[in-house]
Amino acid sequence: MPLVTLKCDEQIPERGKHTYITDKQNPVIPRCNVNTVPGDMTERG
């Protein structure tokens, strides 16, 4: 089976329409779902 390198670091233009940054000087994305239980559906990793 051939290995495929995913393009994880490329920006997707369609996502820009759904991203709201209120402070242009400090574009920090808020942390959400940080207190999840391991194995929970909202756990990302």
Image: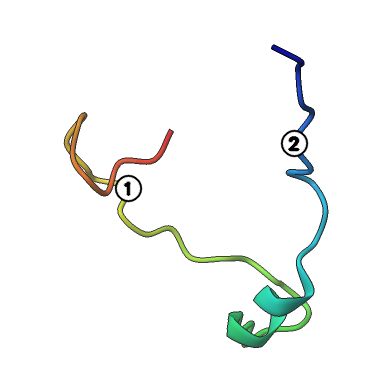
Q: Quadrant of residue 20?
A: bottom right
Which residue is found at the position 30% from the left and 41% from the top? 43
Near mark 2 (Cα within 10 A), the count class, few <14, some 14-19 or many ≥20, is few
* Residue pointed to by mark 1: 34
Which residue is found at the position 78% from the left and 78% from the top? 25
Q: Is residue 36 left or right of residue 25?
A: left
Q: Quadrant of residue 15?
A: bottom right
For the N terminus, the quadrant is top right
Q: Is residue 8 left or right of residue 18?
A: right
Which residue is found at the position 63% from the left and 66% from the top? 28
Q: Is residue 12 left or right of residue 15?
A: right
Residue found at the far front of this picture: 1
Question: Three-letter amino acid code at disc 1?
Answer: Val
Q: Quadrant of residue 13?
A: bottom right
Near mark 1 (Cα within 10 A), the count class, few <14, some 14-19 or many ≥20, is few
Q: Which mark is residue 6?
A: 2
Q: Determine the CA span between mark 2 and mark 1.
A: 26 Å
Which residue is found at the position 43% from the left and 58% from the top? 31
Say which label, 2 or 1, has the lower sequence index: 2
User: In x, y percent, where is residue 42?
Assistant: 27, 49
For the C terminus, the quadrant is top left
Q: Provide the secondary structure element on which disc 2 rests.
A: loop
Comparing 21 with 14, the one in front is: 14
Please determine whether, in this image, residue 44 is positioned above or below residue 32. above
Q: Is residue 26 left or right of residue 44?
A: right
Q: How is the image coloured?
A: rainbow
Residue found at the far top of this picture: 1
